[in-house]
Amino acid sequence: KHQKIIAKKEAKQKWDDRHWVEKSLAEMTERDWRIFKEDYNISCKGGRIPNPMRNWKESGLLDKEILDVIEQVGYKEPTPIQRQAIPIGLQNRDIIGVAETGSGKTAAFLLPLLKWITSLPKIERFDDYDQGPYAIILAPTRELAQQIEEETIKFAKHLNLKTVAIIGGISREEQGFKLRQGCEIVIATPGRLIDVLENRYLVLAQCTYVVMDEADRMIDMGFEPDVQKILEYLPVSNQKPDTEDAEEVEKMLQNYTSKKKYRQTVMFTATMPPAVERLARSYLRRPAVVYIGSVGKPTERTEQIVYMVSSAEKRKKLVQILEQGIDPPIIIFVNQKKGADVLAKSLEKMGYNACTLHGGKGQEQREFALASLKGGTKDILVATDVAGRGIDIKDVSLVINYDMAKSIEDYTHRIGRTGRAGKTGVAITFVTPEQDSAVLYDLKQTILASPVSSCPPELANHPDAQNKPGTVVQKKRKDETIFLQ
């Protein structure tokens, strides 16, 4: 009898200890959620945070209309950031998402927004076009804004919502015309948005949803004052209280299905420098912070190869690499616009199909270059850091840093163009010690941290790679020479 009881206990324990994959939502325990978050490298802080969603069907907060669209768009499984950020967003809480590019952030901020807009009474939705959009999404570069726009339109067209992108390089009149016809969502780069606001092409009288994507990059590019200026155009009437209430679900959802809902601010960033924290402190109210761990940092999935070369040897080395035969598309990064054009010309002379992308190009040329690389008419893109972040080109087999990036963050973003969406990639970097001494230490650390890369001895042993620049090195006693009288 005693053994029976033990066996029964063990069976129950075994039943309780099943992996969360085998359990229904109702059976999930505290421990299961902890394991779930570990499985997806999700960690959070900031008040009571709702459980992540295990799959689209269970995200009880997204209604059938939106679930159908998710299916039509072809989103099978939510990504880690979507699993955690969407349930928080649906509670109208402010969010800081710390995640790499290519992690599915766009849908993570779009879906709660679409859910809110579609839950508004139709009459409210359509009678106030002159009051401006319900949401603004800010991105640092035109390419990124257009990529967000593409993604948004996928969802919006099924839900009968209008989206307008406000970016440089496109005629103001055309954008003004579109805005006058009314739209629910505006996606913009900061400079052009201010322009449009100051010239009264656009008002933000009923905007209750603000997204800042790649916030760290916006600040690097000097957009901090612009972002602050834009946020001053928003109505004050729907600001959240800066108290515990901003973490209370019931309070935050009070007027949720009306235009009186509290303003929600969402910020995505890959790093948290002080300037980004400053922005967050000024504009976000008691945000939930979601960190998506290093699962698949570009530095882990990408084999990084470094060649120490002098400036004069770079071209010869590049030719050697390309002669081994490459699977297009590949991206070659340089630091200067002129360098990009010169390099692309000489590659064309050698019979390669190359195009360039940098800030000195007109908007149409920039779009054409990306389209021809994606479409396969060009095999090589020579680019500056404009293309370093967030740009998604399927199956880039190789990234070459013809010039090493000026900072390790830019380097990480560049090599993250390959090995995306769980695939592996290769990144080759040419390092010229005289020019790149300031980043050698960081580069060495990044390569040492990558399980698929090995650090070449000439980098590992280089004097500039031994200590972080700017640190004072204490001499060891034994290194001193003592002159005896």
Image (cartoon, rainbow, N blue to C red):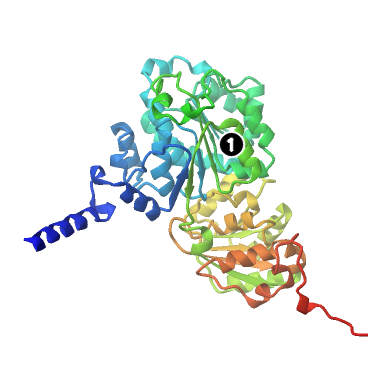
Residue 248 drawn at (x, y percent): 42, 29
Q: Is disc 1 placed on a helix, strand or loop?
A: helix
Front-most of residues 387 and 178: 387
Q: State which quarter of the image contains the C terminus.
A: bottom right
Image spot of residue 451 (x, y percent)? 50, 69
Residue at 74% x, 72% y: name it. Answer: 463
Q: Position of residue 216 (x, y in %)?
A: 61, 44
Report whether residue 362 is seen: no
338 versus 156 height, above or below: below
Q: Which residue is mark 1?
A: 280
Q: Is residue 31 left or right of residue 375?
A: left
Q: Hey, which residue is sitting farthest left in the picture?
A: 1
- Which image quadrant for residue 400? bottom right
Q: Quadrant of the N terminus?
A: bottom left
Q: Residues within 10 Å of mark 1 (few under 14, many from 20)?
A: many
Residue occupying the point 28% across, 52% down: 20
Residue 380 at x, y = what percent? Answer: 58, 60
Q: Is residue 329 left or right of residue 62?
A: right
Toward the viewer: 192 or 356? Answer: 192
The vertical placement of 167 against 423, above or below, is above
Q: Residue at x 86, y 81 (%)?
A: 482
Give 289 or 461, whichever is nearer the viewer.
289
The reply to whether residue 231 is visible in this rendering is yes
Quarter of the figure with residue 267: top right
Residue type for callout 1:
Ala
Residue closer to the observer: 206 or 167: 206
Relative to 172, is 88 on the left or the right?
left
